[in-house]
Image: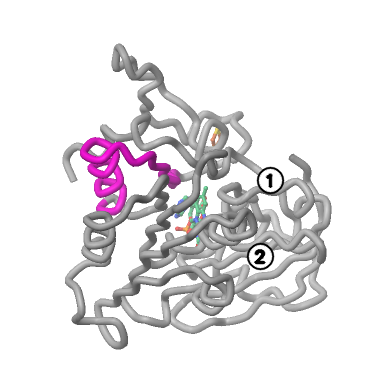
Amino acid sequence: MQQVTGQVVQNRDLGHGLWHLIVEAPEIAAAARPGQFAMLRVGPRLEPLLRRPISFYRIVKYNGWVEFIYKLVGKGTEILTGKVPGDSIDLVGPLGQGWTLLPETKRIGVLGRGIGIAPQISLAEAARKRGIEVHAFFSAREPELIVGLELLEELGCKMYLHSDRGAYSGKVQVVTEYLEELLAREKLDQLYTCGSRRLGRFLLDCWLERGIKGQISLEERMACGLGACVGCVTEIVTDQATGKREYQRVCKEGPVFWVEEVGMLYDYC
Ligand SMILES: Cc1cc2nc3c(=O)[nH]c(=O)nc-3n(C[C@H](O)[C@H](O)[C@H](O)COP(=O)(O)OP(=O)(O)OC[C@H]3O[C@@H](n4cnc5c(N)ncnc54)[C@H](O)[C@@H]3O)c2cc1C
Ligand code: FES
């Protein structure tokens, strides 16, 4: 983990409140792994004081770039939209524990809704580089909110898409119907998701009913992102045999956890 001053290569408005930020930060790109994140200082002033956590969307090691897709939400991300190519940006990273691709894994499913898709693109990329078959089950309110499509198609990922309105709407009620159909015929070794509680619940069911190993990236409000303030703790099952629970820091021990560690968060979805 390092604190560096990166240089903005691109900060593009993708429409519908989404932005694509590319930062040249070779030290961070060299160390970063899919599923990890950086804490970004959004502006030069004291206010807002706290950095904002954003996951790596892509890690382009040969260019020394880290890429982020962020959603315009409030004050911090609004200031971030003002960055232009050539601007400096202060970032700390890579932070947290990323996704795990087990050595024996041959076929995976990534499930995402809206901005929860972004942290899974670098995972899909890494998996394809290892020759792993990737099935991407993505949904959003509008089709334009599904990011990374062209890249995943180029990489040869199999895409299953659903939007509440517009293109891809109407074929299924929810995107997990596609996954259920696939699992009725074929096997997947690992499943991944981020953000959506409904998809988290779905992964828990896949683990309990079919034994498919799953990982979930959690989101908590983060003040330091470094494990120091203990502001981001959540209850984790640390011993499966006894069901023992302990508080762990989402920024340090997470944000990615095994589904059986965080399954009880989804008990009442
Ligand atoms: C590990 C992690 C990875 C993330 N990755 C992405 C990503 O790839 N793309 C993306 O668009 N968003 C991501 N988020 C959410 C993003 O951090 C918040 O949307 C952003 O901090 C909002 O800042 P704001 O000042 O615009 O909003 P405000 O609501 O004004 O923020 C006020 C405070 O709340 C915190 N906060 C607000 N919403 C969230 C949230 N959902 N999660 C955590 N803290 C929040 C802010 O950091 C800030 O300290 C991630 C969050 C975490 C914890
Ligand atoms: S945000 Fe400070 S410990 Fe996690």
The N terminus: image quadrant? top right
Q: Residue furthest front?
A: 185
Q: Residue at x 52, y 76 (%)?
A: 153
- Ligand 1 neighbours mark 1 (CB distance < 8 Å): no
Circle 1 SS class: strand
For marks 1 and 2, the one nearer the N-term is: 2
Image side of residue 53 versus residue 62, left or right: left
Q: Amino acid at mark 1?
A: Pro
Q: Nearer the viewer, residue 72 or 241?
A: 241
Query: Percent position (x, y) of residue 42?
Result: 65, 61
Q: Is label 2 within 8 A of ligand 1 (CB to nearest ligand atom)?
A: no
Range covered by the magenta-colored residues: 198-220
Q: Position of residue 26 (x, y in %)?
A: 83, 56
Where residue 134 appears, as percent x and y from the top left, is 47, 60
Q: How many marks?
A: 2
4 inside magenta stretch:
no
Query: Which residue lies most toward the top here?
Result: 242
Query: Which quarter of the figure has residue 179?
Result: bottom left
Q: Categorize mark 1 by other alpha carbons within 10 Å: few (<14), some (14-19), many (20+).
A: many
The quadrant of the picture showing ligand 2 is top right
Q: Is residue 210 left or right of residue 87?
A: left
Check the image and tell me how it is coloured. one colour
Residue indicated by mark 1? 94
Image quadrant in which you'd find residue 95: top right
Which residue is tagged 2? 67
The type of residue carrying mark 2 is: Glu
Residue at the image position 82 percent from the left and 75 percent from the top: 86
Q: Nearer the viewer, residue 47 or 56?
A: 56
* Point 63% across, 35% down: residue: 226
Residue 48 drawn above or below residue 174: above
Tell me if residue 200 is in the magenta stretch: yes
On screen, residue 170 versus residue 66, left or right, reads left
